[in-house]
Amino acid sequence: MFNLERWHEIFEAISKNKLRTFLTGVSVASGIFILVILLGVGKGLQNGVEKQFERDAAGIVEVWTSTTTKEYKGLNPGRQIQFRNSDYAVSVQKYDQMLQYKGSSFNNWSGLVTYGKESGNYQYRGVYPEYQFIENATMSEGRFINANDMAHAEKVCAIGLKLKQDLFKEESPIGKQIQVNGIAFKVVGVFIDPAGEREETRVYMPLTTVQKAYGVGDKISNMFFVMKKADNFDAALAESKTFETGLKQLLKNKNTVAPDDEGGIGMYNSVENAKRFYDVNLYISLFFWWVGICTIIAGVVGVSNIMLIIVKERTKEIGIRKALGASPWSIIAMILHESIFITTIAGFVGLLMSLALLEVVGPQVKSEFFVNPSVDFNVALTTLFLLVFAGALAGFFPAYRAAQIKPIVALRDE
């Protein structure tokens, strides 16, 4: 029971041993401080990983071509595989029910883009309308490529924000004409890409327009497929692996590539790579928890040892209390109160210091893989629970030992 007399005893005991109490508090505060800082660092790493995967739609499978490495059906190795519209068509026909978004593209990595007196070399791509969602791009002005543009091979384009700033400065580009390798396109939109400036220097046009205007026939460079959302991560991984295996086999058969040839057709599965990153992040977080908890345990052991010394010093006082009728529980409560008070106050100090450090230093850290280190409310509650539990644990065994002292033995103690 927390009564006024009990609090007076606690403060009197602390005032008699200020240095010892301070050093005990430092050990506990440092344990909580280190734990919260490590958890904040772990959260920063997790945020960094998540930011990397925000660049494109979740669950994306990208497919491209390369040269074969094995002879197959009389064809020599070293053949450069070329995707065409029919490759995309058969892929969609077979797997459309599994897909949320889909599209193919024809890429030119360096084209001369001109507006008035301004010009520069920028990447341009012929794409499908759904490519906006595959790239996770948002429109800051105008619109993206649409189905009508594709059907009629319209000479329109959407440009990235960085390209707009380079060529148009403060002028709105909507409705203006730009020249891309000598062919005029009307700007219908400006997009922002979460991946940053590199993607925002692109020009996106209807794929049908690019194929006709630049004389590439039905050639395509890449295909992109975004899987429908699954119930959980494991289900999403299993479905994406099934899709990846089946699609690769389909395209190898169509392009006469050996089933065991690692070349010819390449794939990137963001779900599979995400699992690797999140597994690593989980192990890092578990390691940080382990180190932090071990540090707290070290502090708890220190508090427990101090409480044992206190019990030894107050043996005669405890004997008198028991001789006057004090119950074992009141003796235990007396020691526990002091232990919990010291650890809780010291722990709160460590908690506040660590949160303040994360708040001040976190935003100053500039890294793609380390973003906004912080500790959420649930973690703060967990550390608060650890504080109370640590204080109770540190004081229980000394308190139990104090409760077992016989009055006659205690009164003889010098």
Image: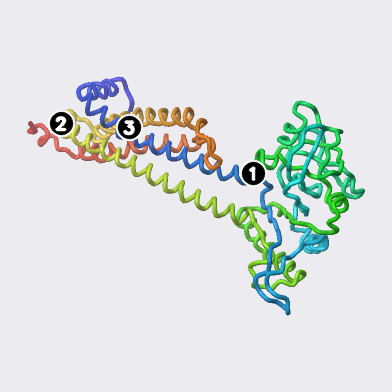
What amino acid does circle 2 point to?
Glu
| Mark earlier in primary sequence (2, 1) | 1
Asked whether 161 or 287 is in front, the reply is 161
Q: Please identify, in this view, whether the residue under mark 1 or under mark 3 is nearer the observer.
A: 1
Residue 319 in the image: above or below residue 78: above
Percent x, y of residue 381: 46, 35
Percent x, y of residue 297: 32, 42
Q: Which mark is residue 199?
A: none
What amino acid does circle 3 point to?
Thr
Q: Which mark is residue 313?
A: 2
Residue to which mark 3 is pinned: 343
Instruction: Say which quarter of the image contains residue 15.
Output: top left
Percent x, y of residue 384: 42, 34
Give SS at disc 3: helix
Disc 2 and disc 3: Cα gap in Å?
A: 20 Å
Instruction: Say which quarter of the image contains residue 383.
Output: top left
Check contact, mark 2 vs mark 3: CB within 8 A.
Answer: no
Asked whether 23 or 345 is in front, the reply is 23
Residue to which mark 1 is pinned: 54
What amino acid does circle 1 point to?
Glu
Disc 2 and disc 1: Cα gap in Å?
A: 61 Å
Disc 1 and disc 3: Cα gap in Å?
A: 42 Å
Label 1, residues with CA under 10 Å away: few <14, some 14-19, many ≥20:
some
Give SS at disc 1: loop
Q: Please identify, in this view, whether the residue under mark 2 or under mark 1 is nearer the observer.
A: 1
Is residue 150 shown left or right of residue 303? right
Give SS at disc 2: helix
Is residue 282 shown left or right of residue 196? left
User: Residue at 77% across / 58% down in the picture?
Assistant: 97
User: Residue at 78% across / 58% down in the picture?
Assistant: 96
Is residue 3 shown left or right of residue 383? left
